[in-house]
């Protein structure tokens, strides 16, 4: 896929061992490009970098996020990667963030802390169990919304894909919102494609993934996925909740 011919108006260049995409001046980015259903994610990211130079990438460093991060660097992204530390993350997730930060020094890793400890008093004890929507709203969505209000990027680079869950089956490459665009270059990639890319490039995938945690969130709300389940079935299992609120619902980014 990385060796695919470059579309017209774009020149592939080499920067170290990665491809860097540059565009000719004069492209009208007010009009959304028509991406083919099987568009190369590098093309989508390349367009995004030109159309939205203030692009910001939130990430929880799941498989999708790690793959997108690597592709973004190959496309020339050198902006922020913003992670919300809810206080409930697995040590493996924090270690994955640190490994990525060491691997990609050209990126700026930003950690927003909702509280250093679950007992920090920001939420009642066990709110995650009694009202996980409220817990996510306070510990995850609010810190990121506050950060983005201050930074005001015109678009976010996001790693969601359609095959993660039935609730994500309609994700488009570009979603327009009130506050900002969301650009989803991996919308059409399957788990198999993501795994193959990660293996080919020896990416530092969260080790919990290989124990069946196909989507990793807070340890309080994540279990391993059973055979035949959606990749996100282990998130808030049995709680009637499928999204944290960052990407769906009234408070979405
Ligand atoms: S995933 Fe669970 S612990 Fe983490 S913020 Fe949401 S409800 Fe709270």
Image (cartoon, rainbow, N blue to C red):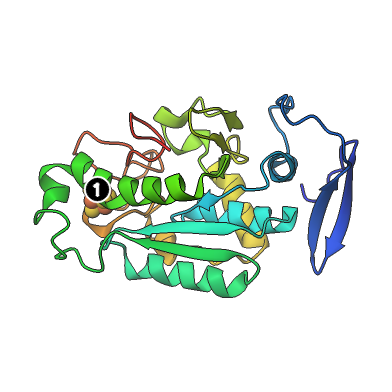
Picture quarter containing residue 175?
A: top right
Classify 95 as above or below 177: below
Left or right of 168? Residue 43 is right
Residue extending farthest to the bottom is: 102
For the image, the number of numbered tags is 1
Residue at point 54%, 68% (across, down): 100
Residue at point 10%, 44% (across, down): 130
Residue at point 61%, 32% (across, down): 173
Left or right of 39? Residue 223 is left
Q: Where in the figure is residue 243, as x and y percent of width and height?
A: 33, 38
Mark 1 CB lies closer than 8 A to ligand 1: yes
Left or right of 33? Residue 124 is left
Q: Is residue 225 visible?
A: no
Q: Where in the figure is residue 13, as x and y percent of width and height?
A: 88, 57
Q: Where in the figure is residue 16, as x and y percent of width and height?
A: 81, 69
- Between 225 and 37, the residue placed more toward the observer is 37
- Between 178 and 127, the residue placed more toward the observer is 178
Q: Is residue 137 visible?
A: yes
Asked which secondary structure carries label 1, the reply is helix
- Between 231 and 220, the residue placed more toward the observer is 220
Q: Where in the figure is residue 115, as x and y percent of width and height?
A: 25, 63
Number of residues whose C-alpha sits closer than 10 Å to that of mark 1, classed few (under 14), some (14–19) or many (20 or more): some
Residue at point 83%, 49% (across, down): 22
Left or right of 18? Residue 41 is left
Q: In the rendered image, which residue does mark 1 sit on?
A: 138
**Quarter occupied by the C terminus:** top left
- Between 101 and 138, the residue placed more toward the observer is 138
Residue extending farthest to the front is: 150
Classify 249 as above or below 77: above
Classify 180 as above or below 130: above
């Amino acid at each position: 896929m990385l060796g695919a011919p470059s579309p017209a108006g774009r020149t592939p260049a080499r920067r170290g061992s990665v491809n860097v995409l540059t565009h000719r001046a004069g492209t009208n980015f007010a009009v959304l490009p028509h991406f083919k259903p099987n568009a190369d994610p590098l093309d989508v990211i390349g367009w995004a970098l030109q159309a939205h130079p203030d692009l910001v990438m939130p990430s929880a460093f799941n498989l999708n996020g790690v793959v997108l991060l690597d592709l973004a660097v190959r496309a020339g992204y050198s902006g922020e990667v913003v992670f919300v530390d809810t206080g409930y993350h697995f040590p493996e997730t924090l270690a994955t963030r640190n490994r990525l930060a060491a691997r990609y020094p050209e990126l700026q890793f930003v950690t927003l802390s909702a509280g250093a400890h679950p007992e920090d008093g920001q939420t009642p004890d066990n709110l995650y169990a009694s009202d996980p929507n409220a817990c996510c709203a306070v510990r995850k969505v609010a810190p990121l919304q506050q950060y983005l209000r201050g930074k005001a990027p015109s678009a976010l680079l996001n790693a969601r894909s359609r095959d993660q869950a039935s609730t994500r089956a309609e994700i488009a490459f570009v979603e327009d919102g009130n506050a900002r665009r969301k650009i989803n270059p991996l919308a059409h990639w399957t788990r198999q494609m993501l795994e193959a890319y990660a293996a080919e490039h020896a990416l530092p995938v969260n080790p919990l993934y290989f124990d069946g945690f196909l989507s990793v969130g807070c340890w309080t709300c994540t279990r391993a996925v059973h055979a035949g389940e959606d990749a996100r079935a282990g998130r808030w299992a049995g709680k009637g909740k499928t999204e944290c609120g960052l990407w769906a619902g009234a408070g979405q980014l």
